[in-house]
Image (tube, helix red, strand yellow):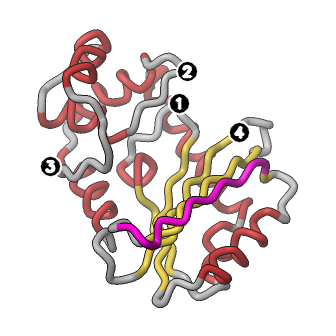
Amino acid sequence: MDTIERIARRNRLRAEEVIRDSRLAEIWRSVGAEVRQVGSLRSGLLMKHRDIDFHIYSSPLRLEESFAAMAQLAADPAVGRIECRNLLATDEACVEWHATYRDRDGDEWQLDMIHIVRGSRYDGYFERVADRIAAALTPVTRRAILQLKYDTPDDVKIAGIEYYVAVLRDGVRTYDAFAEWRRTHPLTGIVEWMP
């Protein structure tokens, strides 16, 4: 197994450990919410950016329950910063939570928990995106995405969807070509694309 594959495998296993140790899913279920994994972990494309994404559904979505779940998570000494954005009055119909979590090795992970009103516009959408991306991967495109993620400088923030569109739709294979692709395809909001 080469370096890229070893890093991807190791980080997937570590992410699963963080999910278990943080009790994230059971905390959200304790307030009656449904928890679904999305993003690079779901699609099998987690690389070196330690980011775990969940969409969490409630009907109705009560702010006090959302805050109660986060209070439980915040009680864990491994949790650092927590941020909240109330987007309930937008098309996104959600409360966006971001938390940092320090794993057993002392590395920091970002937990992105988007608490969404069940039945709203994006209910299930990003789960389908992740599944379609995973289904569209070939060994060549999977490797290209992981390599691009590996080659991305640690201080550069890039949304996972940018890699997937560039590689799967537009055939990008090198970091230089990807940097140029990003220059001509700036991210301006939610990307509604799936293969």
Kindly indicate the quadrant of the structure image that contains residue 107: top right
Q: Disc 3 or 1, which lies upstream in sequence?
A: 1
Q: Disc 4 or 1, which lies upstream in sequence?
A: 1
The residue wearing badge 3 is 195
Kindly indicate the quadrant of the structure image that contains residue 186: top left
Q: Disc 4 or 3, which lies upstream in sequence?
A: 4
Instruction: Give the number of the disc on residue 154.
Output: 2
User: Which amino acid type corresponds to the residue marked 3 in the rendered image?
Assistant: Pro
Callout 2 touching callout 1 (CB < 8 Å)? yes
Which element type, helix, strand or loop, lies under badge 3? loop
Real-space Cα distance between discs 4 and 3? Answer: 31 Å
Real-space Cα distance between discs 4 and 1? Answer: 12 Å
Residue shown at 62% from the left, 46% from the top: 110
The residue wearing badge 4 is 108
70 vs 100: above or below: below
Which element type, helix, strand or loop, lies under badge 4? strand
Q: Disc 3 or 2, which lies upstream in sequence?
A: 2
User: Which amino acid type corresponds to the residue marked 1 in the rendered image?
Assistant: Lys
Where does residue 72 sit, x and y in percent of width and height? 78, 72
Which element type, helix, strand or loop, lies under badge 1? loop
From the viewer's perspective, is 101 left or right of 118? right
Q: Marks 2 and 1: which is nearer the front?
A: 2
Which of 37/143 is in front? Answer: 37
For the record, the magenta segment spans 80-90
Where does residue 96 sit, x and y in percent of width and height? 53, 61
Q: Disc 2 or 1, which lies upstream in sequence?
A: 1
The residue wearing badge 1 is 48
Instruction: Reply yes or no: does residue 144 show up in magenta.
Output: no
Where does residue 149 sit, x and y in percent of width and height? 41, 26
Which element type, helix, strand or loop, lies under badge 2? loop
User: Which amino acid type corresponds to the residue marked 4 in the rendered image?
Assistant: Glu
